[in-house]
Amino acid sequence: MSLSDEIKEHQTLEQLREALKRAQQQYGRLKVSRDELVEAVYQAAKDASLGTPPIKVTPPKKDTRKGKPEVAVIHCTDWQLGKKSVSYGSETCAQRIDRFIDKVVHITDIQRKHHPVREAVLMLGGDMVEGMGIFPGQSYEVDSHLYEQLFEVSRLISKTVSTLANNFESVRVVCEYGNHGRIGRYGEMPKGDNIDRISYEIARNQVGHLVKDWQSSDAWYQIVRIGNYTALLVHGDEIRSFGGNTPAFGILRKVNAWAGGVIEDFNDCYMGHWHTPMSLTMSNGGRIFVTGSPESHNEYAREFVAATGIPSQRLHFVDPDKGRVAAEYVVWLD
């Protein structure tokens, strides 16, 4: 190698070192700014919740009957509040969730004519907000910005919990987040930094005193225990679509694998994400319950997944002694 070649190589190495150094500095500043953004959002949410007086309710009269009790399991998921379509928006979402909880109370009263139903378990399954910046062009498909979405979802969750506390002797809340709650594009931020989680935290600060337990974490799943019954709660985006269809085979394969010792033992699995209610039976006899969405006229679902689910959510009644679902309802909201 000639002297001139060595000089050129040395200059090239120096340029690469400088470029790498600049890139590392830029990444460091970007990471700090994102961390500061997330911290600011959490702090604002906390300050806002502290400024709201605690919600008070009148608990129901105790049911002293000696009949065998069951537990109401309420699966709320995929509200996607802020989404705008031909027949859906933030106001429609609020109306349909109010309608759902009214129906939960009405159906529970029917069940109570036969046996006590003293406890309710509210499972929040994620994608409660539509989000912003999840995919190109999303800003043209929303009727409210992330700020409005966050606090309206928190208000709806708080209202739901307080209504349940008015009608059940004991209420538990279990929270899981979805992909629409993420901040920015996929992979830009840690999965746990999620608007769904922030909305849950705001609601917990407002109505946490009304519930027996509020379960939440940054894990991708939650284990829900009701006596001898154990449920797995996931959002559903852990399963990928195959060929543009709701992937029933993919869902079965993945949940069967989870049930094979990958995570804690569970009887049934609850998920949302696919906007179309259905149930599947696992190889061990457990069930997979896919819950719909209160949304309507989702053009992405119609075009890509070829699904037009009627607006719905799910209500079950669980026998905690036998460890199984005793009654199941898909509650239509259109």
Image: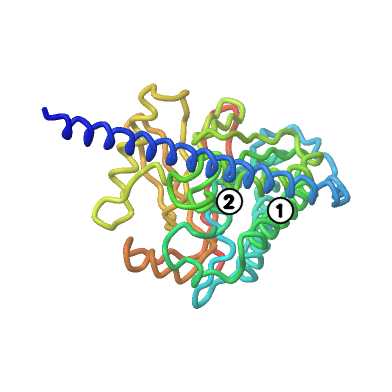
The residue located at (85%, 52%) in the rendering is: 52
Horizontal side of 4 relative to 307 (left or right) equals left
Can residue 57 be seen at all in this image of the molecule?
Answer: no
* Residue appearing at x 16%, y 29% in the figure: 3
Coordinates of residue 54 in the picture (x, y in percent)? 86, 47
Quick one: label 1 or label 2, which is nearer the N terminus?
2
Dividing the picture into quadrants, the one containing residue 21 is top left
Relative depth, front residue between 188 and 236? 188
Residue 79 location, x and y as percent? 56, 58
Between 273 and 196, which is closer to the camera in this rendering?
196
Numbered disc 1: secondary structure: helix
Residue 122 tag number: none
Residue found at x 74% / y 51%: 158
Q: Residue at x 12, y 30 (%)?
A: 2
**Quadrant position of residue 34:** top right
Residue found at the very far left of the displayed protein: 1
Q: Amino acid at mark 2?
A: Cys
Quadrant into which the C terminus falls: bottom right
Residue contact between numbered discs 1 and 2, judged by CB atoms under 8 Å: yes
Element under disc 2: strand
In the displayed structure image, the side of residue 34 where residue 242 appears, left or right: left
Identify the mark at residue 160; answer none if there is no mark: 1
Say whether residue 235 is visible: yes
